[in-house]
Every structure is written in structure tokens, then in C-alpha cells.
């Protein structure tokens, strides 16, 4: 980024005015920042969600995609042709994200890689002075969450976590309704996510690495293992080295709403969880197809439950969050929220979603980038808190229901065995980022 370009992005108020005027960046009066009206975006991890995110950036007139990066050449080529077909743009193609970060003209990186990669790529992007849109869960361990929060602080990074529900009006109004105290005393918050995709068929044999895939770079800091189709695109979520099953995949979205509604900003007093592969013991997934977690607070409890392969759920919803108060119970998911009164203590209330949250989330981020505002709709701290909750649930269940008390200042559990789950051992040559 040239000096004038960087100062352009830093001078928020000037830009905010300019941004309201059509085509202002190409006007002769601003010719000294000729290309500077554009925000250059790079996408790292171009498949499912990465591409979906980029598609929400591209309709913004000021956005230009200058780099696409993926370790699978097939995915990369596909993304390049969609970029041209859908948005009429061409980008440089990369296999190694570090080369993307070396480019001075890249303003924003979108990280759409599997969870085990987020921390390194995020920290490196912060250090390279980029603004970052990072997918959820922000990381695959508690220590990585801390490293990312520290990096964003150190480099004053404008970061948005892909927990787009934070930008949705119906969730925002749900939080307002709850915090206004209308439900009375809330003693329980129940959160659940039941999805078939997290129950896998029986394991398949390892196989040769597909043509065009740099599998070593896909594994990155995770342990060296042979290629296996089931531990690759999409379904990596169900293997501990890369993800945490429904607990982390959906848990972070929905626990975030529970914590936001209850205005919780710290880890729970304790966590107790039980889980197993009870529905599909022969399935390839390592993560729990059945899981129940209880988080204890001073004056309420929050629970998480998931079933993979059985999609029934409370109130006819396969996923959601409910707040149970003395005046009524509020039940919410991405479709709507509705209050079920206790007798006639309060009136019935409901609200439908308008499903624009992904787009609004990206718009919020772009506005924050232009104004150098680090208080995005979902900050790295927001993402870190609920990722830690998801980790706590999985760790307690992996320890057969240990009652865990996590001290987020001392960075230790009340249980030495649990401490070993805090931080993954990075495979050489990758080094855990110490900030
Ligand atoms: N916000 C949401 O609602 C939402 C929805 C789905 C997924 N996600 C998140 O998005 C992320 C990606 O999930 P997905 O479903 O798209 O996974 P995916 O497996 O479909 O795609 C990941 C892509 O990253 C690439 N990749 C892996 N390592 C790389 C590296 N070192 N450099 C560059 N590219 C690399 C892979 O080759 C693949 O193309 C996850 O963190 C997931 O939790 C969020």
C-alpha cells in the first residue's frame, strides 16, 4: 500500500464523506490517490465459506479482489473462474498465504481456511498490517484464541469474526428485549445444535494425495498424517486436529447469542460435560455425535447439547437458543424469535429474521476498515470468548465429565490433565505464535 493509500484508509472522516459520492475516487480532484478509492482484498481458503464471504465483499464498488490463495489448485482455479464470471475481475493466484501477506497493496485478508489454520494466518496478517475478516471459530484451542486477541491488540488490527448473527437485526432486538428484563429472572439458558452432517459414515482407507493438492500445506501446524478423503474438505470439522464437531462449528454462533443476551464477558465458573459417539459408534467422526454441557454462573446455568444424525430439537427447531425466565421463555434461531409467556405475566411477542446478516456483517467491516474502527460488529474478543466456551465443553467431555474450573488469568485449569488441551503442539517448521 502506498503512503497516500494508507493515509486514505486511515483518514476515516474524509473517506466517509467521499464514500457517499459516486465515483469520487476517479475524479480529477483526487487524482493523487488514483487507485486509492479501492480496497484491495485477498482471500485465503477459497472453497465453501471463503468464497461465500468474498461474494459478499465483491458487490461493494470500492472492493477489488487482487489475490486468491488455496492449497488445492482445483479449488483455486474454480474460484478464479467464478471471480471472472460473476464479478468480472482477475486476481493473482497463490498457494502460500505468506506470499499474499508480503504484498503491500493488500488491505484486507479474508481467512476461510479450516480452524487449525486460523491462528497462524490471522497473527501473520495482523503483523503484516492487514485488516482481517476471520472465520469462526476463531481458533481450535484456547491458547490460540489468546494469541489472536494479543496480536490484534498489538497491531491495532481492524478484525471481524465471521459470526454474522451479530449483524442481524432480529438477534440484536432479541438481546435488547432480554436485557430490558421483560422475561423476569432468567435462571436457565439452553442452547442446542442438531445436524446430520456431523455424523459420518464408516471410515475409509487413506489414499494418495489428489492431484493439485499441497497436502503438507493443508496440514500446516497439525500433526503429520496420511491423506484421507474424510479428513479433508468440509468434513475436517469432525476430527480433533482440525475442528471440534458441532460444539465448535455451531456452538460458537449460538453460545455467542446466549452470552450476548446475558451480557457475559468472562469464562464460566465451571464446566461439566458428557459426550460420546453413541448414535453412530462406527462412524469416522472423532467428535461427539451426542453431547451435553453445563456452564455454571453465579445465578444461572447455560447448557449446550448436540446430536449429530438426529435433527429433532425443542420447539420444533433443530438448532436454537432459549432463555427461560420467570415471566416467559424466549426461543430463537436464525428464522425468528418468539416469547412463550408464563401464564399471562407478559404478552406474546415475536420477530422474524430478514436474512441479510452476512451482507450487513461485511458492510460493517468495510465501514470499520475505512474509519480505522476496531470495534467491529464481532470483535476478536467476542469470537475468542465463545470459542473458549466451545473448547471448555469439548475438553470436559473428552475427560469423561470432569468438573473443570478454568482460570482465564492464570491460563490453567483446576486439573493438570485438562491443561494439556490448552495449546496444540505445532508441527515443525510451524511455530506457535508468541505475542
Ligand atoms: N460463518 C459461517 O456461517 C460459516 C459457515 C461455514 C463455514 N464457516 C467457517 O469457515 C471456515 C472454512 O470452512 P469451509 O466449510 O469453507 O471449509 P472447506 O474445507 O470447504 O474450505 C476450506 C478451504 O481452505 C483451503 N485451505 C486449507 N489450508 C489452506 C492454507 N494453508 N492456505 C490456503 N488455503 C487453505 C482448502 O483447500 C479449502 O479450499 C471454517 O473455519 C468454518 O468454521 C463459517
Image (cartoon, rainbow, N blue to C red):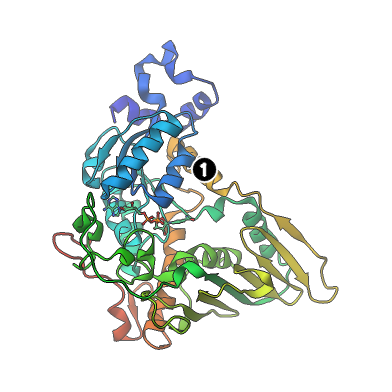
Q: Viewed as shown, does residue 15 lie left or right of 395?
A: right
Q: Quadrant of residue 259?
A: bottom right
Residue sitting farthest toward the right: 344
Residue occupying image coordinates x 26% and y 34% = 104
Neighbour class for label 1 at 10 Å: few (<14), some, many (≥20)?
some
Q: Quadrant of residue 326?
A: bottom right
Q: Is residue 368 visible?
A: no
- Of the 4 image quadrants, the one containing the C terminus is bottom left
Q: Foreground: 225 or 416?
A: 225
The image shows residue 298 at horizontal and vertical percentages of 56, 80
> Which residue is at the front of the view, 236 or 152?
236
Q: In the picture shown, does residue 412 fall above or below 431?
A: below
Query: Which image quadrant is residue 231 in?
Result: bottom left
Residue 148: give x, y in percent of width and height.
33, 58
Task: Determine whether, in the image, residue 370 is placed left or right of residue 92.
Answer: right
Q: Quadrant of the N terminus?
A: top left
Q: Residue at x 25, y 57 (%)?
A: 218
Residue labelled with disc 1: 364
- Horizontally, residue 312 falls left or right of residue 23, namely right
Q: Residue at x 73, y 70 (%)?
A: 183
Residue 406's x, y, as percent?
A: 39, 78
- In the image, 181 versus 117, the foreground residue is 117
Q: Residue furthest left?
A: 429
Q: Is label 1 in a helix, a strand or a loop? A: helix
Number of on-image labels: 1
In this rendering, does residue 292 appear at all?
A: yes
Percent coordinates x, y for residue 7 in the rendering: 35, 29
In this rendering, the answer to whether 366 lies above or below 126 is: above
- Tell me if 285 is positioned left or right of 377 in this view: left
Ligand 1 located in image quadrant? bottom left
Q: Nearer the viewer, residue 118 or 271?
A: 118
Amino acid at each position: 500500500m502506498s503512503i497516500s493509500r494508507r493515509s486514505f484508509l486511515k483518514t476515516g472522516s474524509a473517506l466517509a464523506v467521499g464514500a457517499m459520492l459516486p465515483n469520487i475516487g476517479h475524479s480529477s480532484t483526487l487524482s493523487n490517490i488514483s487507485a486509492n478509492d479501492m480496497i484491495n482484498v485477498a482471500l485465503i481458503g477459497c472453497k465453501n465459506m471463503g468464497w461465500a464471504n468474498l461474494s459478499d465483499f465483491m458487490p461493494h464498488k470500492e472492493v477489488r479482489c487482487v489475490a486468491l490463495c488455496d492449497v488445492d489448485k482445483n479449488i483455486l482455479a474454480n474460484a478464479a473462474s467464478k471471480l471472472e464470471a460473476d464479478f468480472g475481475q482477475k486476481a493473482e493466484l497463490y498457494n502460500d498465504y505468506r506470499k499474499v501477506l508480503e504484498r503491500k497493496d493488500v488491505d484486507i485478508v479474508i481467512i476461510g481456511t479450516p480452524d487449525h489454520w486460523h491462528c497462524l494466518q490471522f497473527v501473520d496478517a495482523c503483523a503484516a498490517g492487514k485488516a482481517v475478516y476471520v472465520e469462526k471459530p476463531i481458533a481450535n484451542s484456547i491458547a490460540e484464541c489468546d494469541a489472536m486477541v494479543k496480536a490484534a491488540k498489538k497491531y491495532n488490527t481492524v478484525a471481524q469474526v465471521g459470526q454474522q448473527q451479530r449483524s442481524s437485526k432480529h438477534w440484536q432486538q432479541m438481546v435488547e428485549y432480554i436485557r430490558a428484563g421483560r422475561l423476569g429472572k432468567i435462571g436457565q439458558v439452553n442452547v442446542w445444535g442438531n445436524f446430520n452432517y456431523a455424523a459420518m459414515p464408516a471410515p475409509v482407507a487413506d489414499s494418495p494425495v489428489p492431484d493439485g493438492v499441497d497436502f503438507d500445506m493443508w496440514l500446516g501446524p497439525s500433526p503429520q498424517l496420511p491423506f484421507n478423503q474424510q479428513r479433508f474438505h468440509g468434513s475436517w470439522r469432525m476430527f480433533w486436529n482440525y475442528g471440534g464437531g458441532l460444539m465448535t462449528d455451531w456452538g460458537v454462533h449460538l453460545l455467542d447469542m446466549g452470552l450476548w443476551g446475558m451480557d457475559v464477558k468472562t469464562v464460566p465458573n465451571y464446566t461439566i460435560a458428557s459426550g460420546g459417539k453413541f448414535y453412530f459408534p462406527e462412524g469416522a467422526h472423532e467428535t461427539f455425535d451426542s453431547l451435553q454441557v453445563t456452564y455454571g454462573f453465579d445465578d444461572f446455568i447455560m447448557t449446550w447439547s448436540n446430536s449429530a444424525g438426529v435433527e429433532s430439537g425443542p420447539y420444533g427447531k433443530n438448532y436454537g437458543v432459549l432463555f427461560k425466565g420467570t415471566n416467559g421463555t424466549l426461543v430463537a434461531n436464525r428464522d425468528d424469535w418468539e416469547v412463550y409467556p408464563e401464564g399471562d405475566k407478559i404478552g406474546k411477542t415475536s420477530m422474524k429474521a430478514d436474512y441479510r446478516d452476512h451482507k450487513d456483517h461485511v458492510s460493517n467491516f468495510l465501514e470499520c476498515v475505512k474509519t480505522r474502527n476496531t470495534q467491529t460488529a464481532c470483535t476478536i474478543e467476542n469470537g475468542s470468548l465463545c470459542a473458549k466456551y466451545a473448547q471448555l465443553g469439548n475438553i470436559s467431555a473428552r475427560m469423561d465429565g470432569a468438573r473443570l474450573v478454568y482460570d482465564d488469568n492464570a491460563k490453567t485449569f483446576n486439573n493438570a490433565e485438562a491443561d494439556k488441551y490448552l495449546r496444540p503442539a505445532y508441527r515443525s517448521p510451524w511455530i506457535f505464535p508468541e505475542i
